[in-house]
Image (spheres, helix red, strand yellow):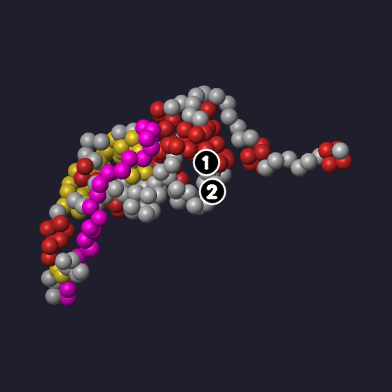
Amino acid sequence: MPPATLRRSGRNLLLGPRSGGSAAGCKIRRGVPPRFEAMTESVTQLTLRINGEDHRVVFPTHHTLLEVLREECGLTGTKHGCELGECGSCAVLVDGRPVLSCLALAAEMEGREIETVEGLQQGNDLHPLQTTFADLGAAQCGYCTPGILMTAKALLAENASPTAPEIREALAGTLCRCTGYHKIVEAVEGAAALERGEEWTAPREVLYGSSLPSSESESS
């Protein structure tokens, strides 16, 4: 497995529902078996380092990094897909490595450097990956794109000139239901060229398709 390929970690799949209140003011837990009461009461407070900024958060200890990023930090670019570690839509970088945030506990992330898709753009400047994905139309519905962008960023940090097979292998854990992956691979190749300081423009045939045969070739 290459370094940039997504890693999986264990997680607790038991999520307790929120508590509600009765008319008399006493709190009633609906649908929570008694043996899970201790789990729903456990709360963690810590500081997460996300995109170069510190976020002080309070959350139920069993919540995943995905849940804390979206619900506590308001960073909704990281997408909630299968919640089983199969689709890769929730991929973020932890200390520069791709991690499936739906399988990682937020309580284990203190002191780690977390990067999400919101941190790619610097001011008004898009990251090369964002530029090439936009120019080539490599994103369609866009739901899987954040995970692909972050995984590709980790790949380019380790391999400045990846081949198409290396790109496909690195992105094997991120699923896209819309595209045939061809433009995604070309966009990563283009971003690699830009990061190397080379000039890159999207090939005409990629944007507009192959040219129609000329009348001379038809007659011959």
Name the secondary structure under disc 1. Answer: helix
Quarter of the image with the N terminus is top left
Residue at 40% across / 29% down in the picture?
157
The residue positioned 13% from the left and 75% from the top of the image is 24
What element does badge 2 sit on? loop
Q: Quadrant of residue 36?
A: bottom left
What is the x, y in percent for residue 69? 31, 48
In magenta segment, residue 3: yes
C-alpha separation, residue under disc 1 versus residue under disc 2: 8 Å
Q: Is residue 209 visible?
A: yes
Image height of 28 relative to 53, above or below: below
Q: Amino acid at mark 2?
A: Thr
The structure residue drawn at horizontal position 16% and vertical position 52%, both measured from the top left corner, is: 43
Residues at badges 1 and 2 in contact (C-beta under 8 Å)?
yes
Q: Residue furthest right?
A: 219
Give the residues in magenta.
Answer: 1-23
- Residue 68 shows in this picture: no
* Lateral position of residue 154 relative to residue 141, left or right: left
Residue 84's tag is none
- Quarter of the image with the C terminus in it: top right
Asked whether, in this view, residue 177 is left or right of residue 50, the answer is right
Across and down, in percent, residue 58 comes to 20, 50
Q: Amino acid at mark 1?
A: Ile
* Residue at the far top in the pictured view: 197
Q: Residue at x 84, y 41 (%)?
A: 218
Q: Which residue is mark 2?
A: 179
